[in-house]
Each structure stands twice: as structure tokens, then as C-alpha cells.
Image (tube, helix red, strand yellow):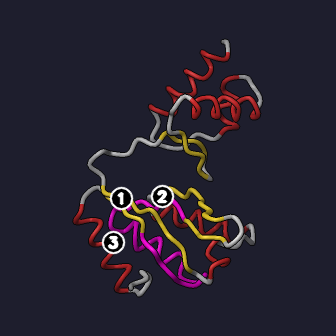
């Protein structure tokens, strides 16, 4: 298989799979190194494919054109991360990312793609097991999330729940 065929294989697998695919899995399946996969992904991105690297692997952004997306400004402490994420996914929302404004680097964005309560649990386990600090620690808890929902009613339920818990920053 040449490099063009390999990239076509990667693209096809990502387009036909709902779950993220780890780079190491692609490398093993295609008989190349992880570095070759990273290069192939970069080339596919340069060709315009919306490939996203998540903590769980690569996905192609196949956003439902009818889906509703909103960027919400929120604030909370570290102890409320799990509750905030659960508040979104329990109403069918997806937490696509976390964004902070850094005084030196400008906007810093981390891809999350948290869709289920299981994803929330895995994310929280990573925070605990890796002694990792969330990006919002740099901004006193202030951060943005891009939230995706299937319809306006679900989005409003998410916003209402986050407001009820005083997570959304209001004017």
C-alpha cells in the first residue's frame, strides 16, 4: 500500500466510525509507525478534512447540519467539573471543547468531545490519575465550552440546568 492509499484508508476508517480511533491502532493496522500516521493526518487536514485529535483518538467532525452549537461562558471550581459535564450530557449535549484566554498565548483550546456519562467518568479518572490540572485553573475557573445539542429544546435544557447551578457567567 502506498502513502496515498494509506491516507485514503485512514480517511475511510474515520468517516465510517463513530468512535475515535487511536493513532497507535491505525499504525499497527496499517503496518507503519505512529509518526507516519501523524504525518498522514496532517496531510489530510491540509486537504480540508476536518480531523480532530481527541484524548481518545482521531475522529472526523461529522456535525449534524441541524445540530445546535453554542459557546457558553462558565465559571466553577475544580470540584464542580464532573457535575458541570454531567449537566450537559444528561440532556443529550456534547461538550466539544474547553477554551481559556491566556494573557501570553491568547486563546488556548482543548478538544474534549465528551458525549456520555462514561466519557465524563473517564475524563475525571484522567484528572485524578495523572494529577492533571484543568485549563480553567489558569483563569480562576473562568472558561468557555462549545456545546452541541441535537435541537433547540435540548440546548435550552442544558443552559437552564447550568444556570440553575450558577455555572453560566451572566452579564
What residue is shown at x 58% (from left), y 42% (from top)?
58
Question: Do callouts 2 and 3 mark residues in contact (Cβ within 8 Å)?
Answer: no
Residue 86 figure quarter = bottom left
Q: At numbered mark 3, what does the secondary structure look like: helix, strand or loop? A: helix
Disc 2 to disc 3, C-alpha distance: 14 Å
Q: Residue furthest top?
A: 1
Q: At numbered mark 1, what does the secondary structure look like: helix, strand or loop? A: strand
- Compared across the picture, whether 57 is left or right of 150 comes to right
On screen, residue 37 above or below 6: below
Which mark is first along the chain, 1 or 2? 1
Which mark is first along the chain, 3 or 2? 2
Q: Which residues are magenta?
A: 72-98
Depth order, front residue of 168/27: 168
What residue is shown at x 61% (from left), y 81% (from top)?
78
The answer to whether residue 128 is visible is no
Near mark 2 (Cα within 10 A), the count class, few <14, some 14-19 or many ≥20, is: some
Image location of residue 145, percent across then percent down: 48, 67
Residue position marked by numbered label 1 in the rendering = 69
Q: Which mark is residue 158?
A: 3
Image location of residue 113, percent across then percent down: 50, 56
Residue position marked by numbered label 2 in the rendering = 96
Near mark 1 (Cα within 10 A), the count class, few <14, some 14-19 or many ≥20, is: some
Disc 2 to disc 1, C-alpha distance: 9 Å
Amino acid at each position: 500500500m502506498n502513502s496515498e492509499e494509506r491516507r485514503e484508508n485512514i480517511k475511510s476508517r474515520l468517516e465510517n466510525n463513530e468512535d475515535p480511533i487511536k493513532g497507535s491502532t491505525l499504525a499497527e493496522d496499517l503496518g507503519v509507525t505512529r509518526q507516519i500516521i501523524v504525518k498522514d493526518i496532517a496531510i489530510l487536514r491540509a486537504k480540508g478534512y476536518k480531523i480532530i485529535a481527541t484524548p481518545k483518538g482521531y475522529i472526523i467532525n461529522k456535525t449534524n447540519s441541524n445540530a445546535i452549537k453554542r459557546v457558553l461562558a462558565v465559571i466553577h471550581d475544580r470540584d464542580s467539573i464532573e457535575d458541570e459535564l454531567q449537566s450537559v450530557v444528561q440532556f443529550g449535549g456534547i461538550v466539544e471543547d474547553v477554551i481559556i484566554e491566556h494573557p501570553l498565548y491568547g486563546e488556548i483550546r482543548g478538544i474534549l468531545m465528551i458525549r456520555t456519562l462514561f466519557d465524563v467518568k473517564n475524563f475525571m479518572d484522567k484528572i485524578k490519575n495523572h494529577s492533571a490540572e484543568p485549563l480553567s485553573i489558569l483563569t480562576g475557573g473562568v472558561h468557555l465550552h462549545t456545546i452541541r445539542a441535537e435541537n433547540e429544546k435540548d440546548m435550552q435544557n442544558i443552559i437552564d440546568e447550568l444556570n440553575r447551578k450558577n455555572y453560566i457567567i451572566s452579564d
